[in-house]
Image (spheres, rainbow, N blue to C red):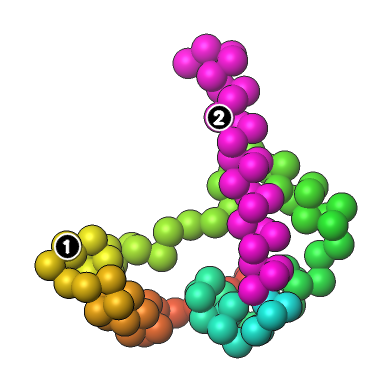
Amino acid sequence: MSATTHSDMLSEIKEVNLSYLLLAQRLLREDRAAGMFRMGISERLADVLASLSLAQTVRLAASNQVLCRFRFDDHAILTSLADKGKSAAAAQTHSAILMASQPTEQLD
């Protein structure tokens, strides 16, 4: 991988991280319970995310690791979302039910 490609990839990771963190904070501010559910996070993690200052958020986003992760570890969830035979509303409802049964992310 060339240095430019590697640098571009790190810049894109940082951009995704910042977008994710800002979205998470907005979701938590607007409706904490719904935000926690949609992100699949615990109350403790929600507290940390919501309390970050802008400087802390930017610093955290600058990580070279992707901070968010897909919640589609379960084949049934991914299949439900990708099923072209279902209407979008039915697929979203089915996947929401499946994701609701997954444990939330915890801080150790």
Q: Amino acid at mark 2?
A: Met
The residue that appears at 64% across and 67% down in the rendered structure is 24
* Nearer the camera: disc 2 or disc 1: 1
Residue 84 position, x and y percent, is 17, 62
Pick whichever of labels 2 and 1 is earlier in the sequence.
2
**Residue shown at 59% from the left, 14% from the top:** 3
Q: How many marks?
A: 2
Q: CA distance from mark 2 to mark 1?
A: 31 Å
| Residue 12 part of the magenta-drawn span | yes
Helix, strand, or loop for circle 1?
Answer: loop
Asked if disc 2 and disc 1 are in contact, CB closer than 8 Å, the reply is: no
Magenta span dominant secondary structure:
helix
Position of residue 6 measured from the top left corner of the image (x, y, whole percent):
56, 22
Q: Tell me the crowding category of disc 2: few under 14, some 14 to 19, or many 20 or more residues within 10 angstroms, Cα based.
A: few
Quarter where residue 12 is shown:
top right
x, y percent for residue 28: 68, 77
Instruction: Name the residue: 55% across, 29% down.
Output: 9
The dot on residue 9 is 2
Q: Within the magenta stretch, is there residue 74?
A: no
Q: Whole-percent x and y of residue 37?
A: 52, 81
Amino acid type at circle 1 is Lys
Neighbourhood count class around disc 1 (C-alpha, 10 Å): few under 14, some 14–19, many 20 upward: few
Mark linked to residue 84: 1
Looking at the rendering, the stretch of residues picked out in magenta corresponds to 1-27
